[in-house]
Image: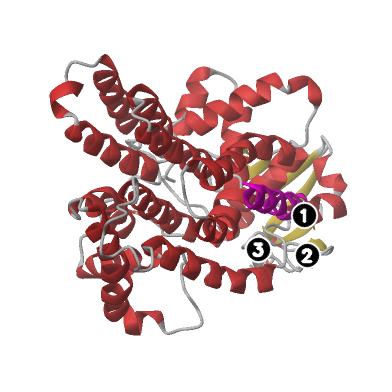
């Protein structure tokens, strides 16, 4: 217990120090903007439905914003206050309550997935992971009602967690199929899962409403993603030509460690596939994939291990073999060393930002004045700046003031060149009392039709996302 407490305090110091230096980006602020900038219940539900996610994270953010309204917290503190308690709860579960050996817990909590993707970066994954592990804790203690409650809450955080939690609920219910049909919690949980699934069906005008990719490429991606998510790695493991060894590593890295777990537990191996296949199919056919998405499937693998390894079979002839999660966790830890060296969160002056929005806000306070209008064709880049400044941008593609992110398909896409050619003169004339600024990506060349315009700001700090800006001031005719 003393060693685990020491590890927890070391982790807390690293995590809080890294968090203080972390610059959020639009993927973190996006849900916060939808949650806090919508003016009524209808607009809130409409905004969330276009996000293609369940509403739980948004509801928690909305509730916290209401409770802390008088505190005047910065936007960064508001979004982190919602997710950090769940991140800490996950670490406490792994260290103290889920009976994991310390050798396995340490690489997990310091690894890329749990430390950075689901910890430093404030998103719904922190909530989903905590509730999923809490459900396993309740399942081990045969607390069925709590188990179903936690599974429902996990399902309400993200589409991928809906699939994993739903698969686990079906497995647990099948194991007790003679008893569960007489339990009200079984039927209530089923109705909740159905409601969560229906809520996530995107509206017809959502940009997430797309047809699945059923090509051979998607089929091959399934196995590649299976391998990557099993090890909790980055989306691309750069030190190796990963694709060249995909088939060999799938066989070696998957069949060996999980076969050991299966042989030790004597449970049907189809349970692993039953849990991780649905999210992998979704990722391979209908998703723009990122490390965080593979991380959810990695959590699914860890969950199946937690089920397979409890209680341990002391008389198994395989008891001296390496535990499968030791291999997984060690690989996750080694791959994370690359990240620790590159991202160096303990440095007093970090070598990177997630977004250039903070630099923009401090360098150009005039943009936040009431009489300033920022015009852009790349509104998503400015979500972070909008949240930090409490203001809005005029989105030329939607021809409207963008108060919060709403992913609706464009009936016609108007480029910045189109807007400058056709509407700029009238827009400037109609807003003579305002200072008109043009915001673009630093990597985008300003069209000739937008001249004359004077460059007022361009991002200088190294940034690991595409949130780098150039700000121009329109010259009046």
Camera sees residue 267: yes
Q: Quadrant of residue 81?
A: top right
Which class describes the residues within 10 Å of circle 1: few (<14), some (14-19), or many (20+)? some
Who is closer to the viewer here, 247 or 424?
247
Nearer to us: label 1 or label 3: 1
Q: Is residue 96 above or below residue 282?
A: above
Residue drawn at the location 46% of the way across and 46% of the way down: 99
First in sequence, mark 2 or 3: give its number.
Answer: 2
Q: How many other residues sit within 10 Å of disc 2, few (<14), some (14-19) or many (≥20)? A: some
Label 1 or label 3, whichever comes before in sequence order: 1
Q: Is-magenta flag for residue 410?
A: no
Horizontal arrangement in the rendering, residue 403 relative to residue 243 (left or right): right
Mark sitting on residue 268: none
How far, Cα to Cα, is label 1 from label 2? 7 Å
Q: CA distance from mark 2 to mark 3?
A: 39 Å
Q: Are marks 1 and 3 in contact (CB under 8 Å)?
A: no
The numbered mark, 1 or 2, whose residue comes first in the sequence reads 1
Q: Which residue is mark 1?
A: 21
430 relative to 32 in the view: left or right: right
Task: Measure the alpha-carbon separation of dots 1 and 3.
Answer: 40 Å
Secondary structure at badge 3 equals: helix
What residue span does the magenta drawing correspond to? 1-20
Which element type, helix, strand or loop, lies under badge 1? helix
Residue underneath mark 3: 449
Q: Which quadrant would residue 214 be assigned to in this image?
A: bottom left
User: Is disc 2 placed on a helix, strand or loop?
Assistant: loop
Q: Is 18 inside the magenta-drawn segment?
A: yes
């Amino acid at each position: 217990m003393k060693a685990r407490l020491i590890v927890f305090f070391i982790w807390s110091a690293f995590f809080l120090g890294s968090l203080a230096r972390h610059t959020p980006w639009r993927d973190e602020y996006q849900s916060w903007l939808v949650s806090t900038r919508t003016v009524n219940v209808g607009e809130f539900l409409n905004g969330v439905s276009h996000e293609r996610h369940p509403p739980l994270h948004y509801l928690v953010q909305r509730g916290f914003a209401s409770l802390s309204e008088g505190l005047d917290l910065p936007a960064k503190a508001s979004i982190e206050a919602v997710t950090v308690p769940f991140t800490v709860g996950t670490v406490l579960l792994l260290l103290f309550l889920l009976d994991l050996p310390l050798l396995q817990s340490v690489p997990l909590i310091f690894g890329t997935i749990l430390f950075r993707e689901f910890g430093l970066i404030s998103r719904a994954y922190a909530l989903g992971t905590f509730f999923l592990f809490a459900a396993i804790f309740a399942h081990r203690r045969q607390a069925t009602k709590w188990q179903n409650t936690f599974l429902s809450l996990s399902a309400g955080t993200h589409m991928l967690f809906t699939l994993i939690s739903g698969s686990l609920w079906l497995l647990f219910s099948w194991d007790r199929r003679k008893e569960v049909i007489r339990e009200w919690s079984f039927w209530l949980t089923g109705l909740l899962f159905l409601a969560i699934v229906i809520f996530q069906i995107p509206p017809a005008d959502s940009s997430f409403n797309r047809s699945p990719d059923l090509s051979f490429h998607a089929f091959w991606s399934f196995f590649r993603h299976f391998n990557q998510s099993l090890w909790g790695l980055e989306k691309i493991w750069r030190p190796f030509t990963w694709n060249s060894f995909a088939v060999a590593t799938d066989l070696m890295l998957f069949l060996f460690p999980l076969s050991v777990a299966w042989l030790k537990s004597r449970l049907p191996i189809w349970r692993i596939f039953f849990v991780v296949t649905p999210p992998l199919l979704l990722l391979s056919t209908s998703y723009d994939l990122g490390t965080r998405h593979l991380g959810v499937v990695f959590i699914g693998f860890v969950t199946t291990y937690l089920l397979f390894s409890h209680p341990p079979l002391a008389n198994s002839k395989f008891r001296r073999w390496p535990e499968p999660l030791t291999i997984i966790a060690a690989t996750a830890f080694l791959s994370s060393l690359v990240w620790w060296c590159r991202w160096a969160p303990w440095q007093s002056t970090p070598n990177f930002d997630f977004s250039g929005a903070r630099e923009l806000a401090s360098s150009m306070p005039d943009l936040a004045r009431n009489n300033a209008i920022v015009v852009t064709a790349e509104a998503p880049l400015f979500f972070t700046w909008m949240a930090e400044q409490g203001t809005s941008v005029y989105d030329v593609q939607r021809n409207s003031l963008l108060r919060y992110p709403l992913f609706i398909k464009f009936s016609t896409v108007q480029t910045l060149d189109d807007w400058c050619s056709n509407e700029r003169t009238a827009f400037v004339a109609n807003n003579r009392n305002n200072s008109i600024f043009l915001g673009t990506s630093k990597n985008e060349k300003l069209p000739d039709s937008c001249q004359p315009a004077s460059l007022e700001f361009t991002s200088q700090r190294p940034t690991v996302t595409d949130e780098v800006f150039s700000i121009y001031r329109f010259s009046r005719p």
